[in-house]
Every structure is written in structure tokens, then in C-alpha cells.
């Protein structure tokens, strides 16, 4: 099992590897710069090399960079669109410097221009970034809960965002909490199998390398994004046991983004997933 958590880079990005070693995990996700700002501290060659050396020393299976939260590629506003493209490009550049495998991004909000316009905007941005920058890391569009004017809560829309882009360059990251509150009932075998079928029919399961494993504090179909501790939310332990033991999920990178209300919460959520996989 490739199991990990979203980790802090406080003290330097290489410190995330130290935290991964402490948690005894073989994968993790980080922000490569300030997630709520447009700029970040310079990533030096020395720090990037230290990150890679440490990652190799603990036999890390996979590392993931999550893009900036401020970016909104679906926006109709030209200035925000430009800043979002620049921010994502910088996240990708940093991911490549660190040797990360994937960059996960939220598509954004159309803010009134309509879903179709938002999708076209995201597609345009991705094509431009990939053509101009030619990243080594694979870009992964994350499904969203569908709150407000968010785009990308179903997989047909996510696929439309990749039109004209080879799927070897772009794929998806499944967030279980987002999927559940977008209407996919992961509590039942039929609901889980239906979700996998939809992903396979659009992107192909081979283009789903990363899963954000989060329980939900809100009900199915609520369109609310509130992550919760594994097995303690509305999805429940049975749903996650089905995920971690599914034959087609064995090689996926599973990343928890569960709340840290107290010290040790990451350890407890990781332990829960490990126990469900036995």
C-alpha cells in the first residue's frame, strides 16, 4: 500500500521527508510554496537536492505537490486567470525541481460565466502551460464537492478540461469526501463500483494515480466540503475498507487530508486505514 498524508513544509521542504519518516509512510503530499499567497520563498538547488536525497534514503514511493488554493483557472477575469496560470506554472516548476511525481490542482469556480465557459477556460490554461513548460510531473485535476460555482464535480466535466491533451500528461485525483458530497454514495458497494466505472469510462483507472482519502462531516449530495476522520464521518469504516482492499486500488497513492484537531491525529487516521487493509 502506498500510504501517506499531507505534510507541513515548516522549516523547509526537506522537513516534510523527516515527518514522513516519523509517521512511517512511503508517500506524502505538500504545498511547494505558500498555499494562500501568490509568491513563495525561493526554492534553492541545495534544498531541492536535499529533499531528493532524503526521499531516496527513506525509499519514498511517491511525492505529490498540491497547487496553490488561490488559483482559479475557471475564472472569467483575465487578471486572475493570468495570475492563476503563473502560480500553477511555479508550482509545477518546483515539483519538477523536487522530483515530485504529480501536481494536484482544483479546477476553480466559473463565478457566473457558466460551467461550459469555466471548463473551456481550464482547458485553455492547461494546454498553454503544458505546451509552454513541458512538465515532468503529471498534472492531476481533483474532483470537487460542487459548492457554489465550482467546476469539476463529475468526471465528464473533468475529462472535457483535458480535451486536446494526451492523458499521459494529465489525469485525475479522486477526493472521497468531495465525491461523496457531490452525490456518489461510497457507503454501498453499488455506489463505490459505480464511481469506479464512471472514472474508468472517462479517464481510465490507470489515469487515477492519487486518492485523497477523507471521510465527510456532511451528508451525501450536500455539496459541502468538510473533511473528517476516517471511519468517524458519514462515509464510515465500511466504505474505506472497500476502497483499501479493492484489487484495482492496490497501487494507488492514498493521501489523507483529515483534520488535525490534536497531536497524533495523522497517526490515528493512518493506523485506521492500515487496519482496514488487513
Image: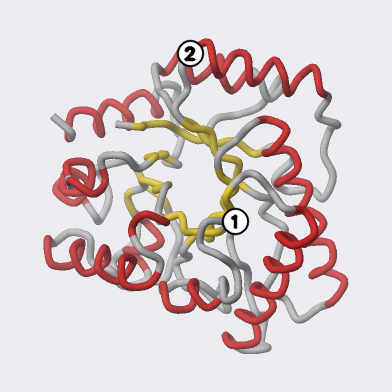
Q: Which residue is mark 2?
A: 58
What is the crowding at mark 2: few (fewer than 14 residues within 10 Å), some, or many (at least 20)?
some
Q: Nearer the viewer, residue 117 or 144?
A: 117
Q: CA distance from mark 2 to mark 1?
A: 27 Å
Closer to viewer: mark 2 or mark 1: 2
Q: Which residue is mark 1?
A: 105
Colour pattern? secondary structure
Cβ–Cβ below 8 Å for labels 2 and 1? no
What is the crowding at mark 1: few (fewer than 14 residues within 10 Å), some, or many (at least 20)?
many
Give how far across and how far down residue 51 sits, in percent. Answer: 66, 20
11 is higher (above) or lower (below) than 197: above
If you read the primary sequence from the N terminus, does the residue marked by circle 2 or circle 1 appear first?
2
Give how far across and how far down residue 278 sits, in percent. Answer: 13, 29
**Going 58% across and 79% down the picture, which residue do you hit?**
149
**Going 72% across and 53% down the picture, which residue do you hit?**
134
Q: Nearer the viewer, residue 94 or 40?
A: 94
Give how far across and how far down residue 225 sits, in percent. Answer: 45, 60
Q: Is residue 145 left or right of residue 197?
A: right
- Residue 266, located in which quarter of the rendered image? top left
**Going 36% across and 31% down the picture, which residue do you hit?**
3
- Residue 221, located in which quarter of the rendered image? bottom left
Q: Nearer the viewer, residue 24 or 11?
A: 24
Amino acid at each position: 500500500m502506498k500510504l501517506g498524508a499531507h505534510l507541513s513544509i515548516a522549516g523547509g521542504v526537506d522537513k516534510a521527508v523527516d515527518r514522513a519518516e516519523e509517521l512511517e509512510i512511503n508517500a506524502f503530499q505538500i504545498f511547494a510554496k505558500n498555499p494562500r499567497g501568490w509568491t513563495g520563498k525561493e526554492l534553492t538547488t541545495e534544498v531541492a537536492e536535499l529533499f531528493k536525497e532524503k526521499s531516496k534514503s527513506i525509499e519514498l514511493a511517491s511525492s505529490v505537490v498540491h497547487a496553490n488554493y488561490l488559483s482559479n483557472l475557471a475564472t472569467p477575469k483575465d487578471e486572475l486567470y493570468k495570475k492563476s496560470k503563473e502560480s500553477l506554472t511555479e508550482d509545477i516548476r518546483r515539483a519538477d525541481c523536487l522530483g515530485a511525481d504529480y501536481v494536484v490542482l482544483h479546477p476553480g469556480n466559473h463565478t457566473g460565466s457558466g460551467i461550459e465557459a469555466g471548463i473551456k477556460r481550464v482547458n485553455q490554461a492547461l494546454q498553454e502551460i503544458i505546451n509552454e513548460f513541458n512538465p515532468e510531473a503529471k498534472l492531476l485535476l481533483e474532483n470537487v464537492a460542487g459548492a457554489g460555482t465550482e467546476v469539476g464535480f463529475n468526471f465528464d466535466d473533468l475529462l472535457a478540461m483535458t480535451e486536446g491533451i494526451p492523458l499521459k500528461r494529465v489525469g485525475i485525483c479522486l477526493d472521497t469526501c468531495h465525491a461523496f458530497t457531490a452525490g456518489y454514495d461510497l457507503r454501498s458497494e453499488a455506489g463505490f463500483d459505480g464511481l469506479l466505472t464512471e472514472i474508468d469510462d472517462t479517464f481510465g483507472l490507470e489515469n487515477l494515480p492519487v486518492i485523497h482519502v477523507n471521510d465527510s462531516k456532511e451528508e451525501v449530495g450536500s455539496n459541502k466540503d468538510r473533511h473528517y476522520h476516517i471511519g468517524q464521518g458519514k462515509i464510515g469504516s465500511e466504505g474505506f475498507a472497500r476502497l483499501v482492499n479493492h484489487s484495482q486500488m492496490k497501487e494507488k497513492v492514498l493521501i489523507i487530508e483529515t483534520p488535525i484537531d490534536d497531536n497524533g491525529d495523522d497517526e490515528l487516521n493512518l493506523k485506521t486505514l492500515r487496519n482496514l487493509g488487513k
